[in-house]
Amino acid sequence: MEKSKNIETLAIHGGQHPDPTTGAVMPPIYQTSTYVQEYPGKHKGFEYSRSQNPTRFALERAIASLEGGEYGAAFGSGLAAIDCLLKFLKPGDEIVACNDLYGGTYRLFTKVFSDYGLKFTFVDMSDESWADALGANTKMVWMETPTNPMLNVLDIAAVSAKAKAAGAMMVVDNTFATPYLQRPLDLGADVVMHSGTKYLGGHSDVVLGLLATADKDIADKMYFIQNASGAILGPMDSFIALRGIKTLHVRMDRHCENGAAVAHFLDAHPAVGQVFWPGLEGHNGHEVAKRQMKKFGGMVSFTVKGEGFEKTAEVVSALKVFTLAESLGGVESLAGHPASMTHASIPKEEREKVGVTDNLIRLSVGIEHVDDLLADLEQALDK
Ligand SMILES: *Cc1c(COP(=O)(O)O)cnc(C)c1O
């Protein structure tokens, strides 16, 4: 029985119970590949760690609980979790996805699964006419919100309703928002996907992927593929992710607070062109974000005034508190240059169409003292 429906309590207790053998409050790291059988086929429900592992199970229950689902599954990376969902489909099936996708997701879609007969259509889901792309063979609708790196906000309830009406499975990549800021299953999605590498793990020390659903049929297939394809998360990494999740709400509050300060600072800075952060009044998804999200998150993208790679590269290189690195969602502040880093795998014309220009910088605002973050940005921009 859950102790509460409040996410702050779920982050710590959701799906968790003391270890049955010792009473250990934290789930032990069951670093074992196999389990003893008393008699052939007679065992405690654990046979082999690809199929069952108590530490992984604890993490899987935690994400199910946080997302308001019933079933969770943990994978060796976010992309492995996406790979599992794509294996629900057959040659000829179509997937309609938002056009501002994480670069690795786009690569998996277009460079791997398109060779297996799946057809991908990329649309602007902020424009209602996106639904024209839905057809008889559309089996899955895929969205990310807020999107990476443009921080576009898409209406989960509206898109899910159209996907459902077309008989397609609705998947939301909830990596940027986390269940603390928004819960897609409550808004009509069938499956939530996470790169747990980011905010859920929260400390830049583990790579993992998660799925959560409330649908028993989807869960059966998800567990079948998880076991049959084998891209499971190991027990040690499951433990690290679980420990990270326990402070999710506290970290997210500070990420959001610092994100707001950074966004407003950049918005007022003369060397900055545009600022992309859903909390800004002028942001095109601000109204949807107010309705759909508890707060506006700690991801902020902006352009440096004037075109060109070089000037922008100088700014990100001059940062001292922000670390120049890929990834996001850790306690430390990171700065990235999407065009040459996370989104380099997307062709230049494609990425510029959605706004990933050479002068775009993406910040993952961490939980350091806000004055140090603002001072760092100031000195880098003033150069
Ligand atoms: C990082 C990321 C992924 C991929 O996850 P990995 O853990 O790196 O495999 C997918 N979607 C989004 C939004 C991400 O940020």
Image (cartoon, grey):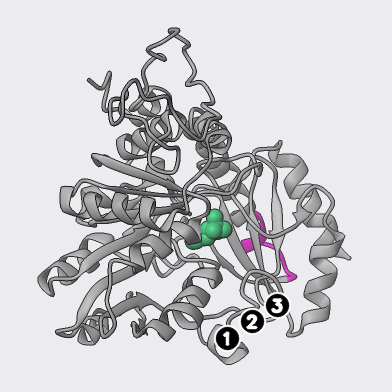
> Between residues 155 and 64, which one lies in front from this camera angle?
64
Q: Residue at x 37, y 50 (%)?
A: 227
What secondary structure is found at the residue carrying circle 3?
loop
Residue 80 is situated, as x and y percent measured from the top left of the image, at 47, 59
Q: Residue at x 44, y 68 (%)?
A: 152
Magenta-colored span: 265-271
Quarter of the image for residue 39 reads top left
- Residue 359's mark? 3
Q: Amino acid at mark 2?
A: Thr
Residue 350 highlighted magenta (yes or no): no
284 horizontally vs 39: left or right: right
Binning the other alpha carbons within 10 Å of mark 3 as few (below 14), some (14 to 19) or many (20 upward) gives many
Circles 2 and 3: CB atoms closer than 8 Å = yes
317 horizontally vs 96: left or right: right
Label 2 and label 3: CA atoms lie apart by 5 Å
Q: Amino acid at mark 3?
A: Asn
Residue position for label 1: 352
Q: Quadrant of the image for the N terminus?
A: top left
- Residue 357's mark? 2
Q: Amino acid at mark 1?
A: Glu
Residue 297 is situated, as x and y percent measured from the top left of the image, at 49, 49
Q: Earlier in the sequence, mark 3 or mark 1?
A: 1
